[in-house]
Amino acid sequence: MLLVAQGPTPGDVWRRELPHDVPVVLGRDAAGWSVPWEPFLARRHAELTARGGKLKVRKLAEAANPVFHAGRPADAFEVPAGGSFVIGRTSFTLAAGEDATPPEPDRPLLDMRTIGHHELDRLAFRDAPHRLDVLSRLPDVIASASDDADLFHKLGDMLLAGVRRADAVAVVALAPGADRPAVLHRDRRLAGAGDFEPSRRLVAAAVAEQKQTVLHVWGAEPGAAPADPFTLQERFDWAFCTPVAGESCPGWALYVAGRFNGAAAATLLAPWESNELRDDVKFAELVADILGSLRQVQVLRERQGVFRRFFSPGVLGVLSGGDPARALEPREADVTVLFCDLRGFSRRAEEADNLLDLLNRVSAALGLMTRNILNHRGAVADFLGDAALGFWGWPLEQPLKVEDACRAALGIRAAFETVARDPAHPLHGFRVGIGVASGRAVAGGIGTPEQAKVTVFGPVVNLASRLQDMTKLLRVPILIDEPTAEAVRERLPRDAGRTRQLVKVRPPGMETPLVVSELLPPVPAGGAPEGGLSDEDLAAYGEALTAFLAGDWAVAYKRLHRVPPDDRGKDVLTEFILKNNRTPPPGWDGVVPLAARG
């Protein structure tokens, strides 16, 4: 059921669908149920409840002005379909819904005309200033619409303003294979005129068959008396339907209908040069073109907004140009993968009283990770609970992929160290572990026809994940594999980052030993900060590691004591030396078996 509000001027009108058995409040402060032109309406004036095909109206205590029903003030009453009530200078009419609409009449069709763009392009508007003034508002109407329902209401108002001879307008949608269009919105020029049903044959001809504007002009039924031109309940004499092109408006069309109102039917059957409806059809065509184009732009912006959360601007440029589907096809590529995991989440989850608050904090942490990945030209492949997976080297070859990945890793570390110093920050107390590895992988759009995502997989992804896990065992924030470390030593400026070869280990579940390195930030201009390592400290650790691998543990132990005591990275060597009584085990090969750690 629909409630139609009609003010003192033709432009003062709205139509709202009433929810079944759910009270709504009519008033100046009522969201969706305000009447901006009515000065006698209180902030909360009347409660409306649609039930059983009728509308129950109850005047609220704070309303100073009366509600008139059947010509008399009333505080509570029922309105049947087609009935009305009045507040101030505005009448409110209850219109029956679509189910109560009578079937489409079988009237003689005098003319059916398909109208192509080329027929209208060469014809100028006869009242151009008015039409163009209305059209100029369309971009703002589309941009300001809060949702599709609001957009349809505003489009209805525009069509009535631009097509002065129209008695009724509608926005319809015809789904593929459907025999009846869905009426997204319908409106009448005057309230109280009752509802109307767009011609199904006309909509089908325009949207499904011709895919362009179609005009129908009907004649009177045989033997019928001439219709009273001032009666608003008689059937329409003409209507046209204009499809809205574009995937953002699936099956949409604009429907406009009216009556002869004393004019001769011949004026609507004449060639377009002298046809009375030519300007109206041209106006509707322009509205449909602008609507379809601007809606498509909105959809593309929304998609780009979604992609922007996962891809850097350079990758977005590739996807937005040419053939994005082909650009997203999976293929092998040399990539650098970053795996970042949030520390402290499990403990916080066990202690949390408010899991939603914890989820918001985890989302903020993932935001810090993804921001650094995207800011350094990476792609976000996945979120795995409280971890993020980023990669470089696809869909474009990136010569600086290792350097970019390492800058992103250092940026994430710095961001979390900054918030850790602020007890009031929601991420205070959280830390991260990061693994970075380089190698061959398959990247692209991967999944099933029902669900797919852009990601990367292969041994290098597993290695990055293992390195991230090993940051817990080796007690450093960022671990990188040897190919990544070599590229950093060769190409990353020392004022951007440094490395130290940390240890040769055999990770749990792996047979092949692995040389791992730590990625460290540069030394600040004022020297190594408290808890940080200077270049001299790294040199001392390098000497200790060389002696450790060679089996000269006495020298290794002495060199380790030159490294600051609060450096946790040296603990794995120190503890392994002490565990073995400062003597290399038989057959020493320099490998620390992490699986043997307690």
Image: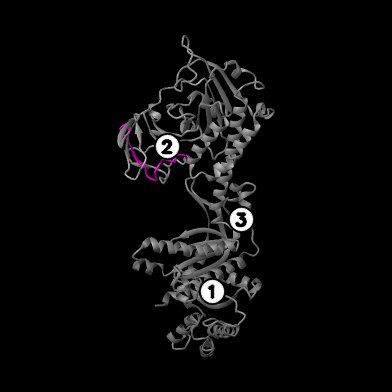
Q: Residue at point 47% right, 76% down?
A: 475
Of the numbered discs 3 and 2, the one sitting upstream in the chain is 2
Q: Residue at point 36% right, 38% down?
A: 19
Residue corresponding to mark 1: 516
Q: Quadrant of residue 241?
A: top right
Categorize mark 2 by other alpha carbons within 10 Å: few (<14), some (14-19), many (20+). some
**Foreground pick, 232 / 51:** 232
Q: Above or below — where is 444 with respect to 212?
A: below
Circles 3 and 2: CB distance less than 8 Å? no
Q: Quadrant of residue 342?
A: bottom left
Q: Secondary structure at mark 2?
A: strand
Q: Amino acid at mark 2?
A: Arg
Q: Residue at point 54% right, 17% down?
A: 262
Q: Amino acid at mark 3?
A: Val
Residue span colored magenta: 37-55
Q: Secondary structure at mark 3?
A: helix
Foreground disc of the pair 3, 2: 2
